[in-house]
Amino acid sequence: HYAVSIVRGRGIDTAALRWLADHHDPSDFVFVDGWTGKGAITRELSDALAPYPDFDPRIAVLADPGRCVDTYGTRDDFLVPSACLNSTVSGLISRTVLRADLVGPNDFHGAKYYRELAGSDVSGDFLDTVSARFAEVAEDAVADAKRLAVTDRSPTWEGWAAVERISREYGIHDVNLVKPGVGETTRVLLRRVPWKILAQRGAGPDLDHVRLLAEQRGVPVEETEGLPYTCVGLIHPRYTRGATGADGKAVGKANRTDRDERTVATG
């Protein structure tokens, strides 16, 4: 198992691909991720691997609420722990660091090791907790796999269509500010300047943490129909990423700016 960086708008770590091709048969590789949102990384991977035809550009995910891959565990929208716990469930490793002053053109993409969080690291506990449940779900998993294998799993890109519709209807006109799915919505509330949360009408306790975070950030939650996701987080189209007050809430109009500073990376 290897972790390979891919960054929206910047592409895949080509140095890593060359290393993998030198040490293994590229046809043996399967790219795996936690979930699909609107499918941006799915598309990025396909484009990035076009010059490397020996690698299969398809990606397998745990959850595919965006309906943009054909290999998935479920299309239900649920919270994958790495969406909000980050390095403390990922071996204290950050997401991609890709700065020209730190990473040269022939280097691997970078990452930060958070050794100062070692006392809070629960990576091993996370793995042990999940693997401890394997035996009790193994029979159902085999049955589900057989059932899925004979169904039409073709990507419909329903999620991408929904994101484009939301971007238009809410006057955002930037799909990158629409973060679909419970994982991405959680990230918006924790790390960005949230504007609104759209929640599937009737969504139950799976969204309790989203409602709590939204209340703490002073962000309205709108229940709506027709979402292919449990919820969608909208980043504020007028504030910079760091425009929050001491209480963590979005600042007032006095500090408003038209400039949108965004950095999106997937490790």
Image (spheres, rainbow, N blue to C red):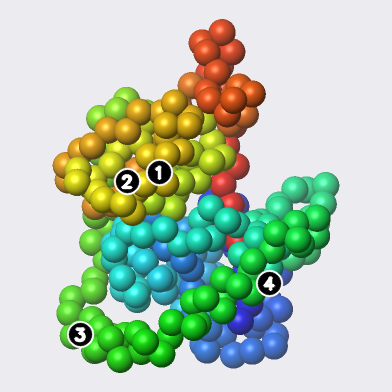
Residue 109 appears in the rendering: no
Image quarter where the N terminus lies is: bottom right
Q: Which amino acid does label 1 sit on?
A: Val
- Distance between the alpha carbons at the discs numbered 3 and 4: 36 Å
Tell us which disc is closer to us: 3 or 4. 3
Callout 4 crowding tier (Cα within 10 Å): few <14, some 14–19, many ≥20: some
Q: Earlier in the sequence, mark 1 or mark 3?
A: 3
Q: Is residue 249 above or below residue 35?
A: above
Which dot, 2 or 4, sits closer to the camera? 2
Q: Residue 147 carries which label?
A: 3
Left or right, 108 with reference to 218:
right
Residue 214, image x and y in percent?
42, 35
Badge 2 crowding class, 10 Å Cα cut-off, few under 14, some 14 to 19, many 20 or more, is many
Q: Which of marks 2 and 1 is in front?
A: 1
Nearer to us in this view, 180 or 80: 80
Nearer the observer, 203 or 27: 203
Q: Are marks 3 and 2 in contact (CB under 8 Å)?
A: no
Q: What residue type is labelled 3?
A: Arg
Tag 4 or tag 1, which sits nearer the N-term? 4
